């Protein structure tokens, strides 16, 4: 019987490829970091140009003849016009863009708005406009009168005009970028790229030497440790609710080694945590207090899922777009087919990798951390189950799913993976037999089905289950 103790928060895993840290990921998903950097750069630029202007004003140097302003009043008018125009364009363009993205989100899902904020091009666009406004206001404020005459920052005014031209180029880029980014194929391809990066980070291509090394073990076996944890472990409870976004695997292995304990994580990134519910179980019981403190520093929770350590999230996003497209209100078959194609590409990439066993060892190869990694069956089922359920009676979608399963099977590395694909093909075939009325369509579906299962005379399996 396990007892209970509280914790929360997260970081990364040494054997996987590096993804940006969760802190950097949080900074990326803001609309203030890049603009703030560019505003600071504008202030530095103004300090440089106004220093040159002061040097020219005191006749320490001479500016080129083409950098001239017809008096203080003309300079004020130019800078006022630039500042007013830039800040007006920012307000109008970004307001209209956010409205367009809100409408697009109804078809693509809420991810559109988050991607808009996360996009570096959009952040730079806002930053350039705001930096130009700040620079123009600073230059405007530097026009002063003194006993020696009126100081007019001619170089600064010239630079403000150059920044205005840069703003026009950035505005054209921004309009093109937004018009392109809200097109459905671009949205789907962007999610697919995220899926590829997440797969490469979580399931890296391993050499034969590394694979052989990972099989070495010392100390108790995983089965023995799981039994000990179940019988006499102490539970650590989550103290916040939210989606688990990041887990500090390296820190947890270190603290488990220091306490000579073993940690079993009950959740992986992407799962929803409830405050007061078990987060992990620790054995022996004496190590639980220190492990609880480590868990409080090695987990990050938030209001939404992220791709950090959670490649299944990208699969779910593609599935969400596909089932929205298949809904009677939208009825966009070709969008669903596009999603299926990209899902097949991602799963083919996973099929060629050795999925991690979810066991982490210290330098002496003793087991210190156990978690439940996403199984191949879970990823395949997450990719096809909801699409299959939403495509009843739609031969085009059913055929594309079976073609995709056949393509994925060519990249598989084990009989277990092929069995998972065959099971999914069985369910698709049974659904087709129940919902497709046209005999010729049904015959085309059977041909595709036999390509997946391998034998034309093989009967459709009835029953069996695997995790989803």
Image: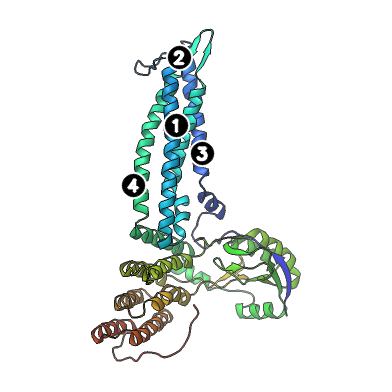
In this view of the protein, can residue 168 be seen by the observer? Answer: yes
Few, some or many residues within 10 Å of mark 2 (<14, 14–19, 20+): some
Q: Earlier in the sequence, mark 2 or mark 1?
A: 2
Look at mark 4 in the image and give the residue it sits on: 176
Q: Which mark is residue 56?
A: 2
- Between marks 4 and 2 in the image, the one whose residue lies nearer the viewer: 4
- Between marks 3 and 4 in the image, the one whose residue lies nearer the viewer: 4
> Disc 2 versus disc 1: distance between alpha carbons?
28 Å
Find numbered disc 2 in the image and state the secondary structure of the residue it sits on: helix
Q: Earlier in the sequence, mark 3 or mark 1?
A: 3
* Residue 467 placement, left or right of 227: left
Q: Earlier in the sequence, mark 2 or mark 3?
A: 3
Of all residues shown, which one is farthest toward the top? 147
87 shown above or below 203: above
Look at mark 1 in the image and give the residue it sits on: 84
Q: Are marks 2 and 3 in contact (CB under 8 Å)?
A: no
Figure quadrant of the N terminus? bottom right
| Residue at 61% from the left image edge and 80% from the top image edge | 223
Q: Which mark is residue 37?
A: 3
């Amino acid at each position: 019987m396990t007892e209970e103790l509280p914790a929360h928060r997260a970081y990364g895993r040494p054997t996987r490829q590096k993804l940006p840290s969760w802190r950097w990921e949080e900074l990326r998903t803001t609309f203030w970091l890049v603009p703030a950097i560019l505003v600071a750069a504008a202030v530095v630029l103004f300090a440089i140009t106004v220093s040159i202007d002061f040097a020219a004003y005191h006749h320490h140097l001479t500016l080129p003849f083409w950098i001239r302003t017809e008096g203080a009043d003309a300079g004020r008018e130019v800078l006022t016009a630039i500042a007013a125009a830039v800040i007006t364009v920012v307000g109008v363009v970004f307001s209209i863009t956010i409205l367009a993205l809100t409408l697009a989100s109804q078809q693509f899902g809420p991810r559109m708005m988050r991607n808009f904020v996360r996009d570096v091009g959009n952040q730079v666009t806002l930053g350039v406009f705001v930096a130009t406004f700040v620079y123009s206001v600073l230059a405007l404020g530097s026009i002063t009168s003194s006993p020696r005459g009126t100081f007019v920052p001619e170089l600064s005014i010239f630079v403000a005009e150059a920044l205005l031209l840069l703003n026009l180029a950035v505005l054209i880029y921004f309009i093109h970028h937004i018009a392109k980014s809200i097109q459905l194929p671009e949205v789907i391809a962007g999610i697919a790229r995220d899926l590829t990066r997440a797969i490469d980070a979580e399931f890296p291509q391993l050499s034969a030497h590394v694979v052989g090394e990972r099989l070495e073990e010392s100390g108790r076996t995983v089965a023995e440790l799981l039994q000990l944890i179940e019988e006499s472990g102490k539970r650590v409870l989550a103290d916040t609710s939210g989606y688990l976004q990041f887990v500090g695997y390296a820190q947890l292995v270190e603290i488990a080694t220091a306490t000579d304990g073993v940690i079993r994580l009950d959740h992986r990134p992407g799962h929803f945590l409830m405050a007061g519910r078990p987060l992990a179980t620790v054995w022996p019981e004496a190590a639980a207090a220190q492990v609880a403190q480590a868990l409080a520093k090695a987990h990050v929770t938030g209001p939404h899922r992220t791709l950090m350590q959670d490649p299944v999230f990208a699969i779910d996003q593609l599935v969400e777009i596909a089932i929205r497209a298949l809904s009677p209100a939208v009825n966009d078959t070709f969008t669903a087919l596009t999603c299926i194609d990209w899902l097949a590409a991602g799963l083919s990439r996973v099929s060629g990798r050795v999925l991690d066993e979810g066991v982490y060892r210290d330098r002496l190869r003793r087991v210190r951390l156990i978690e439940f990694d996403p199984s191949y069956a879970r990823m395949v089922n997450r990719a096809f189950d909801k699409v299959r359920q939403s495509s009843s009676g739609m031969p085009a979608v059913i055929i594309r799913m079976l073609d995709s399963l056949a393509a994925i099977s060519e990249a598989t590395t084990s009989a277990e993976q092929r069995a998972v694909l065959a099971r999914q093909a069985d369910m698709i075939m049974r659904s087709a037999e129940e919902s497709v009325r046209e005999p010729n369509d049904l015959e085309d579906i059977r041909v595709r089905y036999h390509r997946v299962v391998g034998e034309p005379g093989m009967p459709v399996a009835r029953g069996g289950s695997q995790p989803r």
